[in-house]
């Protein structure tokens, strides 16, 4: 009996020591946030050669900014000149700091260039988001299925010390953007077929609602399961005008809940298959449901591998995609979004590779994502087709968001290398009205009840 008690006591002591050790390690990790690491978990130090500076903290806009004024005019470094440009003539010189997609795009697209500017690291988070990020250490967890986000303290980054590709992607999905983003005049556009001149330019109003983004501190598993709610109402072109839809993107179950209003039928249809790689209606198979903002919707069809970190020239402080007072067709050429309105900086990014799971299908069975270390925004990506050929190249235009005190990259381009066309969406370029980040949940669009079939029917029927 004494031997049994002795073994039991020894095992109990070992368990207690292990738990204490794990807790101590977690405390050590938490203590690093805001010291040698940023509050988000990025390396505070710059690169050894100084090309990437040390993290400087959030920079406020110049005095006088208010919503409705062009954001770029109030940025501290707005007068900077490019250090150099990368084009087809010198792309090999810089290939070590470019993505394979960027190299392919430069080589395939006549006149395309990347203007590289000094790097600035001023992407931060509000104090309450930083506090929740610390609280997530040892609390946030991936579900037993390997892909759902079972719990986290929100709003905050679930995994400030990400060990897997899944954790990096969830940090991106749960980055703080307030409770939503609104576009009063959104232009979702597809460039002409090669040799043609006819664009698809779909005008709409749009709202993205993030119910977990309410200020404070809550467990994710205590609120409704939704990464986001999305509302679209098209007003142009004629083929789409009057159509509208409400989408609920889940975090913890496959697929989405999508309701679509068709004015010709005067009815709302539930569309369970309108998700993943299903082509969006009206865009000639150039734009799928999981492609907005570089990647959108549930992650269950892929295995996510964290390849590592790399220094890459990525779109950063790229205000040109948010220049709402310009002319859209002057900003967006037939072959690419204008060189002068894209700005690149050298930054450290996480490289995450997604491969379709065995027994699952997807039109792009392999994807590679480049995720900004400081803000967890997806800033670049490549899609590969079923034959392993590079198919689509994506870039998102990151800017500081003065409403939230964070950085965001809602505007993006997607180039179809095989067909020579591109999509531009999520932007404000040439729309006549700036997009708006919303920090307080006021109004009907920031309630779950707005995104029901009954409400969609009520607000859509004319």
Image (cartoon, grey):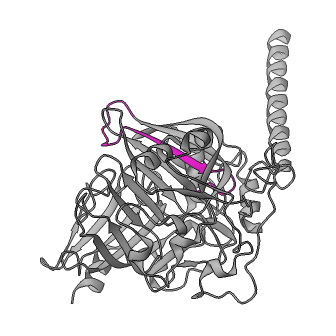
The residue stretch that appears in magenta: 357-377
Looking at the image, residue 97 lies above or below residue 135: above
The residue positioned 47% from the left and 66% from the top of the image is 338
State whether residue 300 appears in this view: no
Q: Is residue 180 magenta?
A: no
- In the picture, measured across the screen, residue 159 lies left or right of residue 59, that is left
State whether residue 434 appears in this view: yes
Q: Where is residue 396 shown, x and y percent of the image?
A: 52, 59
For the image shown, how many numbered marks are present on the structure? Answer: 0
In which quadrant of the rendered image does the C terminus lie? Answer: bottom left
Q: Residue furthest front?
A: 89
Q: Where is residue 286 shown, x and y percent of the image?
A: 29, 56
In-front residue for pair 443/390: 390
- In the picture, measured across the screen, residue 187 lies left or right of residue 343, that is left
Magenta stretch prevailing secondary structure: loop
Q: Residue furthest left?
A: 265
């Amino acid at each position: 009996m004494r031997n049994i008690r002795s073994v039991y006591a020894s095992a109990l002591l070992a368990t207690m020591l292990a738990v204490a050790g794990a807790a101590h390690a977690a405390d050590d990790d938490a203590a690093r946030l805001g010291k040698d690491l940023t509050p988000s978990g990025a390396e505070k130090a710059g690169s050894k050669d100084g090309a990437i500076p040390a993290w400087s903290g959030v920079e406020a806009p110049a005095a006088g900014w208010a919503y409705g004024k062009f954001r770029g005019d109030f940025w501290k470094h707005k007068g900077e000149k490019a250090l150099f440009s990368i084009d087809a003539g010198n792309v090999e010189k810089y290939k070590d700091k470019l993505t394979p997609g960027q190299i392919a795009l430069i080589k395939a697209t006549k006149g395309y260039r990347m203007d590289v500017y000094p790097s600035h690291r001023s992407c931060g988070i509000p104090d309450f988001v930083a506090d929740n990020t610390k609280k997530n250490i040892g609390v946030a967890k991936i579900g037993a299925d390997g892909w759902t986000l079972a719990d986290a303290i929100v709003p905050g980054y679930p995994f400030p010390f990400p060990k897997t590709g899944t954790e990096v992607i969830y940090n991106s999905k749960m980055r703080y953007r307030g409770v939503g983003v609104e576009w009063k005049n959104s232009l979702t556009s597809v460039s002409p077929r090669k040799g043609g001149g006819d664009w698809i330019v779909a005008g709409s109003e749009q709202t993205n609602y993030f119910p977990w983004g309410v200020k404070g501190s809550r467990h994710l598993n205590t609120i409704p399961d939704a990464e986001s709610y999305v509302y679209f109402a098209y007003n142009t072109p004629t083929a789409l005008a009057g159509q509208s839809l409400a989408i609920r993107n889940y975090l913890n179950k496959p697929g989405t809940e999508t309701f679509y209003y068709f004015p010709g039928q005067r009815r709302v249809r539930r569309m369970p298959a309108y998700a993943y790689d299903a082509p969006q209606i009206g865009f000639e198979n150039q734009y799928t449901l999981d492609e907005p903002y570089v990647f959108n919707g549930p992650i269950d069809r892929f295995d996510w591998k964290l390849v590592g970190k790399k220094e890459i020239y990525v779109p950063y402080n790229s205000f040109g995609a948010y220049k709402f007072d310009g002319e859209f067709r002057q900003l967006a050429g037939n072959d690419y979004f204008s060189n002068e309105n894209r700005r690149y900086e050298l930054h450290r990014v996480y490289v995450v590779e997604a491969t379709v799971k065995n027994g699952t299908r997807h039109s792009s069975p392999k994807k590679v994502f480049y995720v900004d270390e400081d803000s967890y925004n997806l800033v670049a990506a490549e899609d590969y087709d079923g034959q392993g050929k590079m198919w689509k190249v994506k870039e998102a235009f990151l800017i500081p968001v003065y409403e939230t005190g964070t950085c965001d990259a809602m505007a993006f381009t997607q180039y179809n290398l095989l067909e020579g066309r591109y999509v531009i969406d999520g932007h404000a370029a040439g729309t006549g009205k700036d997009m708006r980040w919303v920090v307080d949940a006021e109004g009907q669009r920031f309630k779950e009840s707005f995104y029901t079939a009954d409400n969609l029917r009520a607000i859509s029927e004319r």
